[in-house]
Amino acid sequence: MYNDSDPRASLAGAADTRDSGAPIAPPEFFDFRASAPETGGTPEERTFVVRGQNVVLVHTFARGGEELDNGAPGGEVAVLTTDDAASYEVVRADGTATTVDAPGLTVVPPGASRLRVLTDGPIVRLFESGEGEWAERAVNADSYTRPHPRVAALTRWPEPAGEERVRVYPLSAVAEQPGRFGRIFRTRAFMVNFLPALDGPRDPRKLSPHDHADFEQLSLATEGEFVHHIRTPWLPDRTTWREDDHVHLGSPSLAVIPPPTVHTSEAHAGGRHLLVDIFSPPRTDFSQKPGWVLNADDYPMP
């Protein structure tokens, strides 16, 4: 379903919807500014928590001098920032601190940690959904009272190579490259793809509708405006059919896109647009493309 110029055109084929007929979850859409103010209030009041099947996303409009407590999770915490984000220090239980002052992805080992915010700006943290404290805070927690049957369960990928440490992957260390789809990093539980910035609207004649067999996609808009186009396939039970979604969101915002819906996101209106795609567990098809996963040496495949 990709045009020939799309780097994903050589990936495995689309999802086969001729299956057991398990229900298809509805897509969900969240405007962070509508519920979490950018200024004023406490860090908790400036924090928006939303989840998918395997991942909890925590977005905070952070202020310099504040501390954001990660708790003591049993899995890694991924921290992602883009152009206008805050700088921060990762402080672990032993008191060691790692400064992060550039956009990119930071992976924090399991165990107690916190972020000491150095400058103002948004910070996004990813936790595994098994971390009950975070999962229960999600605004859409009720959507996952029961696991969605079409989404693959999370089994952590292998331990990272080398000693346990905070791993920092600045976007400035790797240039965008034609033929590679975005800038992709993975952890044991997550895959994060920083897509290229777009100036102005996307050409409506060059969209990329596609579907996924068994994994959910979280599309995080950090700058600009997007229309998320989503079509739910028709299964034999007509009472479950849905109208197409064409949802216009500003930023920051999130679309949770379930399998096997057909979807594409369209940058809308003028200005600059940034989108980050998040998957859990990591995608095998992206991981099998040579050179696509930029920290593959640190995080081996199963």
Image (cartoon, grey):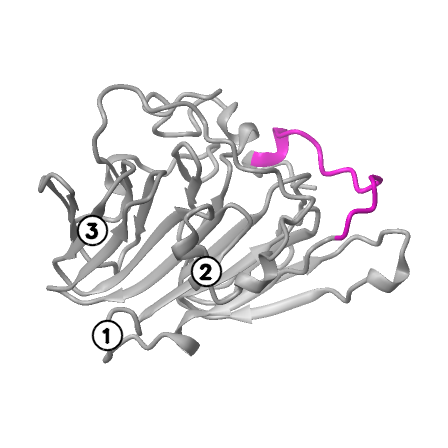
Residue at x 24% of width, y 79% of height? 41
Name the residue beneath numbered marker 2: 136
Q: Which amino acid does label 2 sit on?
A: Glu
Viewer-closest of 44 and 6: 44
Residue at x 23% of width, y 27% of height? 164
Q: What residue type is labelled 3?
A: Arg
Q: Earlier in the sequence, mark 3 or mark 2?
A: 3
Q: Give the range drawn in magenta.
A: 8-23
Residue at x 31% of width, y 37% of height? 175
Whole-percent x and y of residue 273? 42, 60
Say the numbered circle drawn on residue 199: none
Between tags 3 and 2, which lies in front?
2
Q: Would you say the magenta stretch is mainly helix, strand or loop?
A: loop
The reply, left or right, for residue 228 in relation to residue 50 is: right
Task: Quarter of the image for the N terminus: give it.
Answer: top right
Whole-percent x and y of residue 88? 16, 53
- Does the rendering let one see residue 117? yes
Whole-percent x and y of residue 282? 49, 34
Q: What residue type is labelled 1?
A: Thr
Q: Earlier in the sequence, mark 1 or mark 3?
A: 1
Say the numbered circle drawn on residue 42: 1
